[in-house]
Image: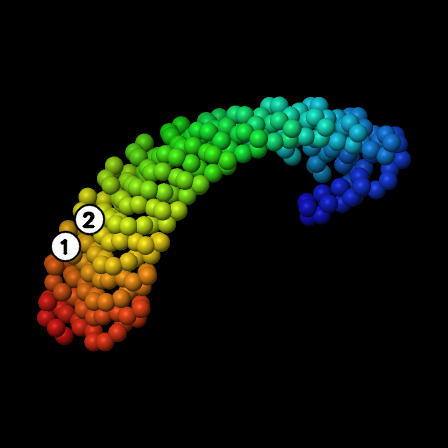
């Protein structure tokens, strides 16, 4: 419904309009907007209202485009946006606000594009994220924070993509992951960690895809899995382990599909099942064991 009203509202101003003051009303008689026309274009002070009567926006037009200081408001009357326009384009420092009146974000614009410092805030005024724009694209260091003020992640942007060293953190302050990005994709060695600081996984990426040897670990530090990847697909021997360190699964992959001998074991290390796969499908005899005895 809002989209339809907005589209109708825009269409009103596309129609030829006589010079002088104008007023537009909602169906219930409530004022929707008022302003002035000159030479067929909006000119001078302008105001619009929400359907509940609260002020929605106020500012100034010049030659039919937004000019100078503009303000917009939430339906509850709280300020939503405050900023400056030049020839219809945002220019200078702009501010946006949450419905509770607290600052939501502030960014600097130049000729209608983000250019300079940007900051986002939670409703409790805690900084949410910060970084820098250059000519409409994120460039330079950035940081993201939890609502409690703890660092969530940090890295660098280049032409709107993550580039270079990157780190993320759990809410308790422990390191969550670290590695390097190239062109917005993970590249090179990467590590991930549990909230207790224990290593969760380690391996390498190439163009955002897992490549080469990888290992994952249980939260108690014991090895969980070990194998290799090619283009994000498992390739070659692969093993999985229980939390007690005993072998759980032993298998082989080809282009991401099970291919070759497969064996599984119980927590005591006894053989549980054995068979063979070909191109991801069970192929040939299959054996089931209980307490190491073939059934």
Q: Quadrant of the C terminus?
A: bottom left
> Is 225 placed left or right of 280 in the picture?
left
Residue 53 in view of the camera: no
- Crowdedness near tag 2: few (<14), some (14–19) or many (≥20) residues, C-alpha within 10 Å: many
Task: Measuring from the top left, give residue 244's x and y in whole percent.
Answer: 15, 51
- Circle 1: element type: loop
Residue receiving disc 1: 246
Earlier in the chain: of badge 1 and badge 2, it is 2
Q: Is residue 131 above or below residue 292?
A: above
Query: Is 122 on the left or on the right of 109, as rendered?
Result: left
Residue at (18, 73) in percent of width and height: 287
- Looking at the picture, tell me which residue is in the foreground, 65 or 231: 231
Q: CA distance from mark 1 to mark 2?
A: 9 Å
Residue 190 position, x and y percent, is 31, 41
Provide the secondary structure element on which disc 2 rests: strand
Quadrant position of residue 276:
bottom left
Q: Is residue 58 above or below residue 188?
A: above
Viewed as shown, does residue 95 lie left or right of 166?
Answer: right
Residue 243 image point, x, y percent: 18, 50
Picture quadrant where residue 264 is located: bottom left
Q: Residue placed at 21% from the left, 66% from the top?
A: 262
Give residue 223's mark: 2
The residue sitting at 46% across, 29% down in the picture is 140
Q: Position of residue 101 (x, y in %)?
A: 57, 27
What numbered label is drawn on residue 155? none
Q: Which residue is depicted at the point 30% across and 54% down? A: 229
């Amino acid at each position: 419904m809002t989209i339809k009203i907005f589209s109708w509202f825009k269409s009103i101003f596309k129609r030829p309009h006589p010079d002088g003051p104008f007023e537009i009303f909602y169906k219930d008689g409530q004022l929707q907007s008022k302003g002035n026309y000159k030479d067929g274009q909006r000119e001078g002070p302008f105001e619009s209202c929400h359907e509940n009567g609260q002020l929605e926006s106020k500012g100034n037009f010049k030659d039919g485009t937004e000019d100078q200081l503009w303000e917009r408001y939430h339906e509850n009357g709280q300020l939503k946006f405050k900023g400056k326009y030049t020839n219809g384009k945002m220019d200078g420092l702009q501010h946006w606000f949450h419905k509770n009146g607290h600052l939501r974000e502030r960014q600097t614009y130049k000729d209608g594009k983000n250019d300079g410092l940007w900051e986002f805030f939670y409703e409790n005024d805690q900084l949410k994220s910060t970084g820098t724009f250059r000519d409409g694209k994120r460039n330079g260091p950035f940081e993201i924070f939890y609502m409690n003020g703890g660092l969530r992640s940090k890295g660098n942007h280049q032409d709107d993509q993550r580039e270079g060293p990157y780190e993320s953190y759990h809410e308790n302050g422990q390191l969550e992951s670290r590695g390097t990005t190239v062109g917005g994709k993970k590249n090179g060695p990467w590590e991930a960690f549990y909230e207790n600081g224990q290593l969760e996984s380690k391996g390498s990426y190439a163009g955002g895809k897992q490549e080469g040897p990888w290992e994952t670990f249980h939260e108690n530090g014991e090895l969980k899995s070990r194998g290799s990847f090619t283009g994000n697909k498992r390739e070659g021997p692969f093993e999985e382990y229980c939390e007690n360190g005993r072998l759980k699964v032993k298998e082989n992959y080809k282009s991401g599909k099970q291919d070759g001998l497969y064996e599984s074991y119980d927590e005591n290390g006894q053989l549980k099942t054995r068979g063979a796969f070909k191109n991801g499908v069970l192929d040939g005899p299959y054996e089931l064991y209980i307490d190491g005895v073939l059934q």
